Image (cartoon, grey):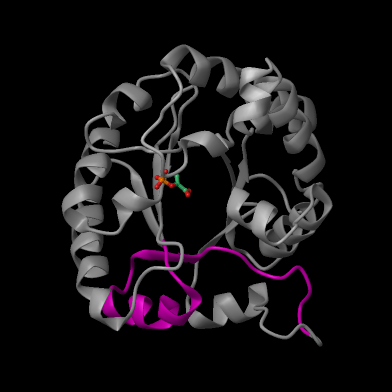
Amino acid sequence: MTKRKLVAGNWKMHGTGADLGQVTAISIAAETAGCDVALCVPATLIERAVCASPGFAIGAQDMHSADQGAHTGDISAAMLKDAGARLTIVGHSERREAHGESDTDIRAKAEAALAAGLVVILCVGESLGAREGGQAVATVAAQLDASLPRAGGTELLAVAYEPIWAIGTGKVPTTDEIADMHAALRARLIAAYGEAGKLVRILYGGSVKGSNAAQIFAVPDVDGALVGGASLKAADFVPIIAAAG
Ligand code: PEP
């Protein structure tokens, strides 16, 4: 089933007010794109990015699952909405690894984000060890099963398959490996949500560039991309957006 693709940038811990011109340039390209485009910027930039580019989908990279409370340094879904965010990433491998986030934590975050009306990009992906040990599909399918939201519906949900060994390394799985993984994730989504599972967008993430985007977007069940390094500059990101359209 062909869906309108979603190309989302993840700026990670990059970007200050000096980079708002890049947000504006990307938002201008998004206006005429044949795909949905979003940019997940550092929390400190969300409100300014929204003001700089009204109408463009600005998002966060993480959030806390609680509405409010004694959680020093954390930000809730309601706060992200208040700042103008329309979406959030949850479960990025850098959060899972560096902050010890479990599938249970990520499921709670996804459910809280959906309840607040945020689009959710839920990330899953295997380590190099799992890939080399022939356990990639089993590992990622188990991650997905355990972290998928059970409440909040599927209209605002997207899943991003991001092999950890492909993030920021320039290494990319073969198109057959991507196809096999996306087919397995689609089957898990249908098992969890029935017919609605067919409509959940599955993004690929990991070293997507202008030079490889078209090939990746042509893989069955690749409904877009989550892009790190190549989303920081409009000159690098716009060709990826164009390849999706
Ligand atoms: C990411 O971290 O989500 C990512 C896909 O990074 P990169 O595109 O730089 O590999």
Tell me which corner region of the image, top left, top right, bottom left or bottom right, holds residue 218: top left
- In the displayed structure, 232 sits above or below 186; it is below
Which residue is nearer to you in this view: 98 or 222?
A: 98
State the image coordinates of residue 170 (x, y, percent, origin top left). 36, 35
Residue at x 77%, y 52% (from the top left corner): 107
Residue at x 61%, y 45% (from the top left corner): 123
State the image coordinates of residue 12 (x, y, percent, origin top left). 46, 62
Residue at x 67%, y 31% (from the top left corner): 197
Q: Which residues are magenta?
A: 40-68
- In the displayed structure, 116 sits above or below 173; it is below
Residue 43 sits inside the magenta stretch: yes
Residue 181 sits inside the magenta stretch: no
Tell me which corner region of the image, top left, top right, bottom left or bottom right, holds residue 88: bottom right
150 lies left or right of 189? right
State the image coordinates of residue 146 (x, y, percent, origin top left). 81, 40
Count of numbered circles on the image: 0
Is residue 162 among the parts visible in the rendering?
no
51 lies left or right of 46? left
117 lies left or right of 53? right
- Quadrant for the C terminus, please: top left
Is residue 123 among the parts visible in the rendering?
yes
State the image coordinates of residue 163 (x, y, percent, origin top left). 55, 34
Q: Residue furthest top?
A: 176
4 lies left or right of 159? left
Residue at x 59%, y 36% (from the top left corner): 200
Which residue is nearer to you in this view: 132 or 58?
A: 132
Which residue is nearer to you in this view: 231 or 154?
A: 231
- In the displayed structure, 136 sits above or below 68; it is above
